[in-house]
Amino acid sequence: MSEVLNFLHSRNSAPKLIAPAPSAQQMQDIFQAAMRAPDHAWLRPWRFITVADERREALGLVLEHCLMLRNPESDESARSKARNAPLRAPLLVVVVARLSQHPKVPAIEQRLSAGCAAQGVLLAAEASGYAGIWRTGESAFDRNVMSALGLDENEEIIGFVYLGSRAGKAKSIPDLDTAAFVSSW
């Protein structure tokens, strides 16, 4: 098996991330790789918002505020979880789908392309010696969160990609039998 295939077979998410995160130059390389996502009609239906340092705390306040708008009865535990979510990693990348009207490229295909770009961020970060995890949750689908992040009406959050260095060993992942997922027609 090639080294690249071995790498692809072993990549997995890292729920516990610590500093350091990729540097600004490394992130440029990571984003360059992500922009190789499949892109019908060259729409480039994605963009990325990085959140680092003290801006993570500011995002946490936004997430808490938007939680209270969605559910004013949220208890302190839920509020704390929302407020501290961006602190789970030294760097967050908000992956945004930028949807446009196109006669041959429906919105779902544009969302999938942005999802492929998110996977590209994860793969390139891992190839650069870092780790990450893709998370969503209610905040990713909340228009108030999207507005606070400066998204336009035609934009949606695909996911929050948390990046940093893996804390501890990689979790073991089971081998999956491709026969359970592949068939011939």
Image (cartoon, grey):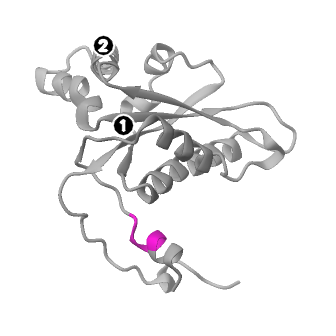
In the displayed structure image, the side of residue 90 where residue 140 appears, left or right: right
Question: Residue 28 appears in which quarter of the rendering?
Answer: top right
Where does residue 151 sit, x and y in percent of width and height?
Answer: 56, 19
In the displayed structure image, the side of residue 115 where residue 100 appears, left or right: right
Query: Badge 2 is on which residue?
Result: 65
Query: Badge 1 is on which residue?
Result: 137
Q: Residue 117 colored magenta?
A: no
Residue farthest to the front, as pictured: 25
Report how many numbered discs are placed on residues in the image.
2
Where does residue 25 sit, x and y in percent of width and height?
Answer: 50, 38
Q: Is residue 19 above or below residue 152?
A: below
Q: Residue 10 colored magenta?
A: yes
Chief secondary structure of the magenta span?
Answer: helix
Q: Which sits in the foreground, 98 or 33?
A: 33
Q: Which residues are magenta?
A: 7-11
In the displayed structure image, the side of residue 130 where residue 94 appears, left or right: right
